[in-house]
Image (cartoon, grey):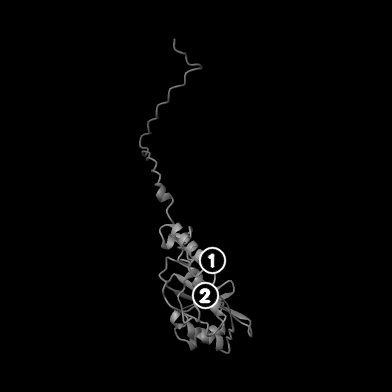
Amino acid sequence: MADQPSGPPSPPPSPAKPAAPGAPAQKAAPAKPAAAAEHAKVAPPAGPPDPSPPPDVPPPAFIASLQAAVPGGVVHVSYWVGDWTIVVPAERLIAVMRHLHDAADARFDLCSDITATDWPPRAQRFDVVYCLYSTPFRHRIRVKVRAAELEPVPSVTAIWPAANWFEREAYDMFGVNFTGHPDRRRILMPEDWQGYPQRKDYPLEGPGELLMENPLDWLKLRQAREEAEIE
């Protein structure tokens, strides 16, 4: 004999109420977008905005004299949180830097740093950044040069000899094509290192994915060189 269901039977579903006369018909809920559309990739940034100075903040006098002395040397003047930045074309870099070093109202006798940032969406993917300081006047300026991957950027070691190590580091980490450098070689990574570790498209798995299909091939090659040196 079949088991009898326990408890009272569930009530039947109530019939749908007819729509009132003249009422608009209910629209079906829109279908949810596909997962790919929900998680659409956001385009990577194409570089910092480099905001212009506000109207009530005039540029320093040495920037105005630079613009007059080196026509076409400054393509943009930026001001952000108290710091001044000028954007300079690579072909005018040496003339601009020589003026900033020698001019009586500038006297930037210290190149405190040279670094770079990488913005792959741009044709000129690199921002090469020079941080300058004047010990006589105690003022600072940041000089920025935009360069493509193989575009030559002239070395400033003839103006500031200490730029030698800074440019080597930017070359080592980003592959910036400094020209006229007296000793352009890696300074942090081994000479046989593949690629440039601080580029945004550098593989997270390491250099083996960059030039060799199998990462073990690169490791075996490096191990063989080390063993040969020991022998």
For the point 61% across and 80% down, the residue is 139
Is 92 drawn above or below residue 17 in the view shown?
below
Q: CA distance from mark 1 to mark 2?
A: 28 Å
Rendered view: 59 above or below 200: below
Residue 101 visible within the image: yes
Which residue is painted at 40% across and 58% down in the image? 213
Residue 29: x and y in percent read: 39, 41
Along the viewing direction, whichever of 197 and 76 lies nearer the viewer: 197
Give the x, y percent position of residue 133: 60, 80
Q: Badge 1: how crowded within 10 Å, few (<14), some, or many (20+)?
A: few
Q: Where is residue 189? Give x, y as percent.
A: 52, 68
Q: Nearer the viewer, mark 1 or mark 2?
A: 1
Tag 2's secondary structure?
helix
Q: Closer to the camera, 172 or 49? A: 172
The amino acid type of the residue labelled 1 equals Ile
Secondary-structure class at tag 1: helix
- Rendered-image quadrant of the N terminus: top left
Residue most extreme to the front: 231
Instruction: Point out the tag, 1 or 2, that comes first from the N-terminus.
Output: 2
Identify the residue at horizontal 52%, vertical 75% (top origin).
168
Amino acid type at circle 2 is Arg
Residue located beneath label 2 in the image: 168
Q: Are circles 1 and 2 on residues that touch, CB within 8 Å?
A: no
Q: Which numbered dot is residue 230?
A: 1
Name the residue nearer the viewer: 38 or 30.
Answer: 38
Count of picture labels = 2
| Residue 183 horizontal/vertical position (percent) | 50, 79
Indicate left or right for 210 with 102 as reference.
Answer: left
Residue at 40%, 44% (x, y): give it: 32
| Residue 113: image tag | none
